[in-house]
Image (spheres, rainbow, N blue to C red):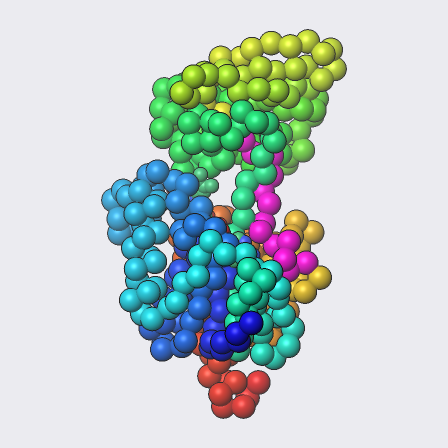
Amino acid sequence: MSARHYDVIVLGAGSAGLTAGIYLGRAKLKTLIINEGTVGGQMVLTHAVANYPGVLETGGFQLSQIMKQQARQFGCKIESNVEVTQLDLISKVKQVEIDHDEVYTADAVIIATGGKPRKLGLLSEDQFKGLGISYCATCDGDFYAGKDIIVVGGGNSALEEAVSLTKWVNSVTIIHQFDHFQAHQHAIDEATNHPKISFIMESEITKFLGNDTVEGVSIINKRTGETSVVPTNGVFIYIGYLPNSEKFKGIVDLSEYGEVIVDENMKSNLPGVFAAGDIRKKKYRQITTAVSDGTIAALSTIDYIQNLKNNFV
Ligand SMILES: Cc1cc2nc3c(=O)[nH]c(=O)nc-3n(C[C@H](O)[C@H](O)[C@H](O)COP(=O)(O)OP(=O)(O)OC[C@H]3O[C@@H](n4cnc5c(N)ncnc54)[C@H](O)[C@@H]3O)c2cc1C
């Protein structure tokens, strides 16, 4: 095993991690970005980003490639498609092991490991991901203009996103497993009073149907056991969100949902450990908000390292 020291290690190369890298690199800090998946994170899943200021419309992959190029241009080293196999974030000198092999150390760590939408867990769900199944109305809603779609879920996100989707679509059918919603009354009122929204309660999707894209779903009524097919052009799933924080449990303070808790300067409870982007406890998760978090986390880290060098920490 070889040990190499960096000023900062950034965990995650999505929009938050790459932005942090750009700022750290420009500040001449020796920075390593370690990413467990493909560089770009969730951006890569978006085929058209139309709400990133300064860019009329671009592919998520293209945007991620430019961010990667910027981070590299300012001197960041990026290790992608590796696995973080061991972590020490508590000691003053932080340590990250990847692939049970390389060990890197750093004075500070930024956690920018993002998250993933919770899935229904059906085999056909993977088959149609991006081909009629979406987890992001803000991102994909306008691709369903004039179409009939389904929203799965009965919490605030499902009901609020169903209402937001009515801007584009012809109709929304909400499929929910219980006979009541787990949402605030105003969200329930808005959805139930909306002329474009109808409901199938106490039911679950058992299979997505279609050839190249989703054309319908098989459902089962959980109370009666009755099965039926609902034709649709697309399905938006809002049954929760899973932060990629398994590796930080018991190390850094997490919310009840597993999000890293930070202050407004992106500082966690551990000295020298910061968090940015979708991984942190917050309400709105977008590329712009991740980029903002990444900027703040990097600036806080630059201060921390400066204080460390001046023996103030
Ligand atoms: C389908 C879809 C479409 C979207 N469309 C839009 C849109 O049009 N506009 C918009 O603003 N937002 C959109 N979003 C939301 C936006 O993509 C996210 O809010 C944003 O990209 C989050 O960035 P992040 O850097 O915080 O996390 P992520 O993008 O999730 O990146 C985190 C990275 O960390 C890696 N990682 C995970 N665990 C570890 C670990 N232990 N160690 C190291 N690396 C790890 C992951 O593999 C990933 O590469 C969309 C989201 C989805 C799912």
Q: Give the range drawn in magenta.
A: 237-249
Height in image: 280 above or below 195?
below
> At 58% across and 42% down in the image, what residue appears?
241
**Position of residue 164 measured from the top left corner of the image (x, y, whole percent):** 46, 32
Left or right: where 30 falls relative to 89: left
Height in image: 96 above or below 114?
below
Height in image: 226 above or below 299?
above
Quarter of the figure with residue 16: bottom left
Q: Which residue lies furthest to the right in this view?
A: 223
Quarter of the figure with residue 242: top right
> At 63% across and 24% down in the image, what residue appears?
176
Residue placed most toward the observer, 244 or 313: 244
**Position of residue 192 measured from the top left corner of the image (x, y, whole percent):** 57, 23
Residue placed most toward the observer, 126 or 259: 126
Q: Does the magenta stretch include residue 238?
A: yes
Q: Does the magenta stretch include residue 92?
A: no
